[in-house]
Image (tube, helix red, strand yellow):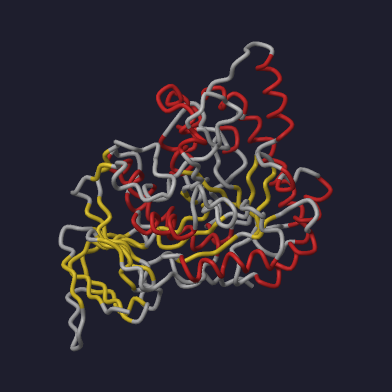
Amino acid sequence: MGTYLIKNAEIINEGIRVVGDVLIKDERIEKVGSNIQVNFKVEEIDATGKILIPGVIDDQVHFREPGLTHKANIYTESKAAVAGGVTSFMEMPNTNPPVFTQQLLEDKYQIASQTSLANYSFFMGTGNENYDELMKTNEKKNDVCGIKIFMGSSTGNLLVDNPVLLEKIFAGSEVLIATHCEEEALIKANIEKLKNSKTKFTASDHAIIRDEDVCFESSLKAIQFAKKFNTRLHILHITTAKEIQLFGNMLPLKDKRITSEVCVHHLHFNSNDYERLGYQIKCNPAIKDEHCQQAIWQALLDDKIDIIASDHAPHTWEEKNVDDYFAAHAGLPLVQHTLQIMLHHVKQGKISIEKVVEKMSHAVAECFQIKERGYIREGYFADIVLVDLNKSYRISKENILYKCGWSPFENFTVPATIENTFVNGHMVYGIHGFNESIKGERLKFERN
């Protein structure tokens, strides 16, 4: 473990910008200040003209291991993540087999302990027949990020839409419940309607099939359950203007019992992009029209939406590059470029860099009650990222690190380069390459 002194960086943290130094020692941030001097050996980094921010915490990724490793695995995708300034991730249970037992959950932690370059946590999966196993997560409230319910848009036993079972889960859970909210019955009805007017579906039909009502009705149902039992609910990837009315900004984040997330691709793309990118941007929930895109942007800025994430969901090029709506897999590889895309929107004047740091680092730590991460604070783990805002970066086949080897942002130039990523004080990534000698750590949580 190295000892580092980062000098003359523009530190962006807790809504404040200040030029200063950060001393990293023994996994932690030892000191934050100006003109720090030390009397021991240290590797000094001149960060003049660059920004230093807390590492991104991504609360929704799909790294596909075990069972779907032809698409991705924890090693390859965590490597892509740290290259993009993501120092911690929370991964979803729709692997093969799905994470329906506590043993399968711990198996994933074991894989990550040996291979992940970033810090990690894993959601416990909800099925139709694993209630007793699911409730054992209550005993691990400080060791597991939460439980995940697919209230729509899933297959087999992962789809949970039985209201009796859902009520039982919301009543029994003492940990955060994260939901994917789309109403499956409405999706099927929309498909049948379209079949009456056309014989071949296209990528642009995705936003019609998975429309505003599909999302709203399911999100409303989840919120009703959560309010009935005072359950801690986090609704993932909000995409519609209609859903915004379900969320408030009157309480500080730490006091909210119902929170929400938006994903970078829903902010960056809208339904006009289907013509150009086709099934590359097919995802669930669907990318919607400009009206919805503008609404979720405003809700993010107004703090009705709390977190920015990736929903990184890689598929092979062969699984995406088909001419059949029903055969084209839903999901985008994103985790390597989410921070840089948001910095593009900073340059465009749509959001401040302080707000990006809040929504991608601070708010995630507060929302999930992550222990000693998400901020540049003395005594906290040194999960920090050095960024050059004056050095553009062109996303290309040559620098995409996902196992699937492609990105919907390919050939897009972003205005910022990730210079260094520190995970627990270890410089795992720099512009000259990776140091994989030390792996990430299991996230811990501080919950009553």
Q: What residue lies at 68% left-to-right and 40% top-to-bottom?
A: 152
Q: Is residue 127 left or right of residue 20?
A: right
Q: Residue furthest top?
A: 197
Q: Is residue 248 left or right of residue 37?
A: right
- Residue 18 at x, y = what percent? 24, 63
Which quadrant holds residue 17? bottom left
Locate the C terminus by quadrant.
Answer: bottom right
Residues 405 and 221: in front is 405
- Residue 236 at x, y = what percent? 57, 47
Q: What residue lies at 53% left-to-right and 57% top-to-bottom?
A: 253
Which quadrant holds residue 42? bottom left
- Residue 192 at x, y = what percent? 71, 20
Q: Is residue 344 left or right of residue 367?
A: left
Locate the N terminus by quadrant.
Answer: bottom left
- Up the image or down, 175 lies above or below 225; here it is below
- Up the image or down, 251 lies above or below 441; here it is above
Q: What residue lies at 57% left-to-right and 26% top-to-bottom?
A: 325
- Up the image or down, 76 lies above or below 108; here it is above
